[in-house]
Image (cartoon, rainbow, N blue to C red):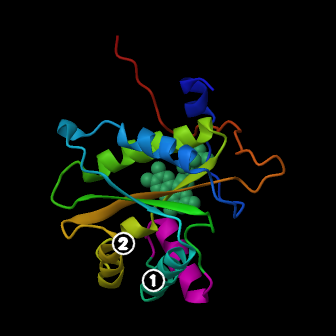
Amino acid sequence: MEALEAILTRRSTRNYKPDPIEQKTLESILEAGRQAPSGGNNQTNHFLVIRNKDVLQKLISLTETAFSKMEPYENMYPSLKRSITASKKGGYVFCYNAPILIVVTNRRDYGNNMADCACAIENMMVAANALDLGSCWINQLKWLNEEPEIVQYLYGLGMKEYERVYGAVIIGIPASPDSLPNRGLMPQKGNEITFID
Ligand SMILES: Cc1cc2nc3c(=O)[nH]c(=O)nc-3n(C[C@H](O)[C@H](O)[C@H](O)COP(=O)(O)O)c2cc1C
């Protein structure tokens, strides 16, 4: 698939088969993330590649507990509000049961931490699409990136003391009849362009 086609047809996948993906394929996706641009060529993204089911389950339970302690308010970011409401009901799974969750951390004292993380995640999502895999940005661990219990648990997984989560992405085989990601065009309601000639 050509680069532009892979970019234009990338859509979020939120339903996955439990099957693992090949190590070589995963490494290609991670390399796409590692090769993303970074401010000042800092290269301080840190990719925690979580495939272990018990670890994923623990993160699911930690996020649900953290959200259920929070209270939604009127003008709250709608996705965050939905996470809180769903967690209070119980059974909230922030990562859609995908087989792989890649958590991207970076230095918390670095001004381009989220920008560098976003470049890496977009590269990985486009690479996943080019390789016929589904992906979706997952933001819950970013929202909870100062939650003490989650921070401690992530230290145990390899996050450094000076790092925090700035984004995450799930990757896997879509649970569609042909196992391919949805590649429908997304109607654009915003993202204005102004030419100044
Ligand atoms: C910064 C950012 C955070 C996002 N967080 C989530 C999320 O936590 N959960 C989710 O299901 N989708 C998340 N998304 C995916 C968006 O909902 C999705 O990209 C958007 O609706 C456009 O759809 P498309 O990706 O299929 O083109 C996020 C996307 C971005 C860029």
Q: Which residue is mark 2?
A: 157
Q: Which residue is mark 1?
A: 62
Q: Is mark 2 within 8 Å of ligand 1?
A: no
In the image shown, does 131 or 191 lie closer to the viewer? 131
Is residue 100 located in the magenta-colored stretch of the structure?
no
Q: Main secondary structure of the magenta part?
A: helix
Residue at image position (47%, 70%) is 80
The quarter of the displayed image where residue 1 is located = top right
Image quarter in which the C terminus is found: top left
Front: mark 1 or 2: 2
- Amino acid type of the residue that numbered disc 1 sits on in the rendered structure: Leu
- Amino acid type of the residue that numbered disc 2 sits on in the rendered structure: Leu
Compared with residue 2, is residue 140 higher up or lower down, i.e. above or below? below
Residue at image position (49%, 81%) is 58
Q: Would you call the spot at circle 1 few (<14 residues within 10 Å), some (14-19), or many (20 or more)?
A: some
Q: Position of residue 12 (x, y in %)?
A: 61, 50
Q: What segment is highlighted magenta in the picture?
A: 74-91
Q: Would you call the spot at circle 2 few (<14 residues within 10 Å), some (14-19), or many (20 or more)?
A: few
